[in-house]
Amino acid sequence: MSQLPVRVAGWSARHPWRAIAGWFAFVVLCLAAGLSTGSRAATTEDYRVGEAGRAEAMAAEGGLQARATEQILIRAGSGPLDTPAVDSAVRDLTERLRRLPEVDGVAAPVRSADGTVLRVAVVLNGPELDGRKNVVPVLAQTEEVRAGHPDLVVEETGSASISKGVNDQRGKDLALSERVTLPVTLVTLLVVFGSVVMAGLPLLLALSSIAAALGLSMVASQLLPDPGVGTNMIMLIGLAVGVDYTLFHLKREREERARAGGRLGPEALVELAAATAGRAIVVSGLAVIVSTAALYLATDVIFSSLATGTILVVAVAVVSSLTALPALLVTLGRRSERRAARRASRGRPVRTGRAEAGPGRVVGALLRPARRHPVLTLGVSTLAMLALAAPALSLKLVDPGKDTFSRAIPAMRVHDRLNAAFPELSVTHEVVARSAPDRTAQVRRALADLGRRTQSDPLFARTTEPTVRTSADGRISVLDLAVPSPANSTRAIRSLDRLREEHLPATVGELTGVETAVTGDVARGRDYVDHEKGKLPLVIGFLLLATFAMTVWAFRSVPVGVIGVLLNLLSAGASLGLLVVVFQGTWAQGLLGFESLGAIASRVPLFLFVILFGLSMDYQVFVVSRIQEAVRSGMSARAAVLEGIGRSAQVVTSAAIVMVTVFGAFVALHLTEMKQMGFCLAAAVLLDAVVIRLLVLPSLLLLLGDRAWWPSRPARPARRTRSSAPTTAPTAAPTTTAPRNVG
C-alpha cells in the first residue's frame, strides 16, 4: 500500500505524455460511456417508505395509484367574473388540452365558494414522476389561453409544475454558486502558489475529475437509479476534494524542490512527494469512501445516489492526483529546467525554489496557547465546542414538502391562491384497503362509514360524502379524505394521527383479513422522517467504527483512532448546534433569506454526519501524517506535533477556504434544505480547520506525548540536517520514512 502511490507516480513521471493522454482519454471514455447508456431515473416505487409506501404499492396493484394532476385557475383581472368570457376560456382550454398526448383527462370546471375563481383539473398521463416532463406542453397551452383572453387571469399550479419550477430554480442557483466558487478558489490558489499555472492545475484536475465521475454516475444509475441529486453532489464534493488532494500534493512537491536546492530532477521530486503526500491522499480518499458508504445503510434512493456520486468523484480525484498530476508536474518541471538553462547561458541568476516557509504568524499565534498551556487550551476549546453543540439537543426534524418552496417560483404563488380559494385541496389523505374480492362490498361500506366519521371531525373538510374507488378485480379500494390545512401544519399532522389511531381502527380496521394503510403528502413526510430517525443510529454507529478502524489502520495507533472519532463528533455536534440556532428559529430569516420551518430538514443531520466525517478525515490524515513523519525522523513527540501541524497548516487552511466557499455558496440558494446543508457543512469545515486542528488536536497530542502512538511507536532514525538532502535521484522507490521532509 505504501509503495503503490510511489510506483504509480514514478511511472507517470517517466512517461508524462502517456500519463496525461491516458488521463484525458479516461475522462472522455467515462463521459462517452455515460452518454451512451444515459441515466436511469428513479421511479415512484424507489421512493416508497413506511406505511405510506405500502399504501401506494397496494393502490398501484389495483391501478388506483396517484396521478399527476394540474389545477388551472381562471379569475377576473378586475371585478367579478364575466360568465361568457369564462365559458369561452374554459372551452378554449379544454379543446387545447384534450388534443395533447400528455393529457389523460380534463375535468369539468369548479367554482370557488365565493364565486371569484374557477378551477379546471387536468390529469396527466403516465406515472406521477413523469409529470415534470409531461407538464411542459400543458404549461405552453395555458400560456396560449392566457394570451388569447387578456381580460382574464389564467394560471397553473400542481405538483408537476411546481417540481419543474424547483428544478429550474435549482439550476439557476447552482450556476450562480459556480460563478462565485470558481473565482474564489482560483484566487485562493494564486495566493498559495503565486503562479497562474500552478493555481490552474488543481482546478483543471478537479473539473476533469468531475466530468469523469458524471459519466460513471450515469453508468452506475443502471444499478442504482438517479433521483436527480447525484450530479449536484458530484460537483459539490468533486471541487472540494479535487482541489484539496491536488493542493496537498503540490505543496509537498514544492517543499521537496526547495529542500533539494536544484540538486534533484523533476522525476525524483515527484517520487519524493508521492512517498508522503501520495500515501496520505490514498488513505484520505479511502476514508471518505468508507465513511460515505454509510449512506447506503439508510436504504433511501436519495442517500444512495448521494453516496454513489461522492464515492465515484472521490475515487476519480485520487486517481488523478496519482497519475495526471505527477505527469503534469514533471512536464512543467522540465520546462522550468530549460528556462533555467537558458538563463544560466545568458549569465542570469537561476532561482532554485523558495525556501520552506514556517507556519506563519496567524497559525503561530493560534498554536501558541496549545504549545504553552495545553491543558487550559484543551479545556476551554472543548467546552466552547460543547456549548455550540448544546442547542442540537432541541433538534426537530421535518420533511420539507412543497409548501416550503420559494415563492419566487410562479407555480408556488398560484398554489397559495388555489389553497385560499379551495381549502379542501390543501391536503388529501388516501386510505387504501386490500381484501379478497368477495369482501369488496363489506370493505366499501366500512370505508364509507370512515368517510362519514371524518365529516364530523373538525380537522377534516366538510364536503359531499367521500367517494370510494375500487379496482376492477375488487381487491383494492381507496378513499380520499380532504383536510383544509397546509401539509406542514399542526392540524394536518393531527388529522393524520387521528385517522390512523382512531377513525381507521374503529371502521375498516375491525374487519378481519383486510389490510389497510394511509398515504398522502402528510403521511409520506411523517413516515420518511420516522424512517430516517430509525436509520440514524445505525449510520452513526457505522461511521464511528469505520473512522476508528481507518485511522488505526493508517497510523497504527489506537489513541489516534480514538481522537479521530471524538474530534469528528465534536465538530459535527457543534455545527449541528449552530444549524439549530440559525434555522430552527426565526431571527436569521431576513439575514439569510429563508422562511423558517421551525425545524431542520430531515435529510440534513444524516447527510451532515456522513459527509463531515469523510471530509474531517482529510484533515486528520494530512495533519497526523506530517506529525508521524516528524516522529519517524527523530524528533521528540512535542517537537513533532508542533512541526507537523505548523507545516500542514497552510494546506489545511487553504483547503478549508475552498471548501467553506463551495459549501457557503449554497446558503445563497432558494431551497431551505440546500441552505441548511451548505451552512452546516461550511460551519463544520471552518470549526474543524481552526478549532479542532489548531487548538484541540495539538493540545491532546502534546499531553499524550509518546503515548499517542501506542502500541507501535514509530522507530526514530538518526537525526539528519537540511544539508543531508541527496544530490541525485533515488535509485529505489522512496518510502514514507526517507528522505525526511524537515520543512
Image: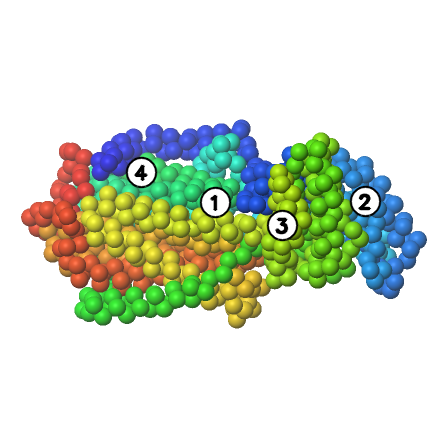
Residue at image point 84% right, 46% down: 108
Position in image of residue 18 (x %, y %): 34, 29
Q: Which mark is residue 390?
A: none
Residue nearest the observer in this picture, 306 or 66 = 66
Q: Which mark is residue 505?
A: 3
- Which residue in the protein does label 2 denote? 107
**Residue count near mark 1 (Cα–Cα under 10 Å), binned few <14, some 14–19, many ≥20:** many
User: What is the C-alpha distance between the residues marked 3 and 1?
Assistant: 34 Å
Q: Which residue is mark 1?
A: 303
Q: Which residue is mark 4?
A: 322
Figure colour scheme: rainbow
Closer to the N terminus: mark 4 or mark 1? Answer: 1
Q: Looking at numbered disc 1 in the image, what kind of residue is underneath it? A: Phe
Number of residues whose C-alpha sits closer than 10 Å to that of mark 3, classed few (under 14), some (14–19) or many (20 or more): some
Residue 363 percent coordinates (x, y) = 27, 63
Q: Is residue 104 above or below residue 405?
A: above
Secondary structure at numbered mark 1: helix
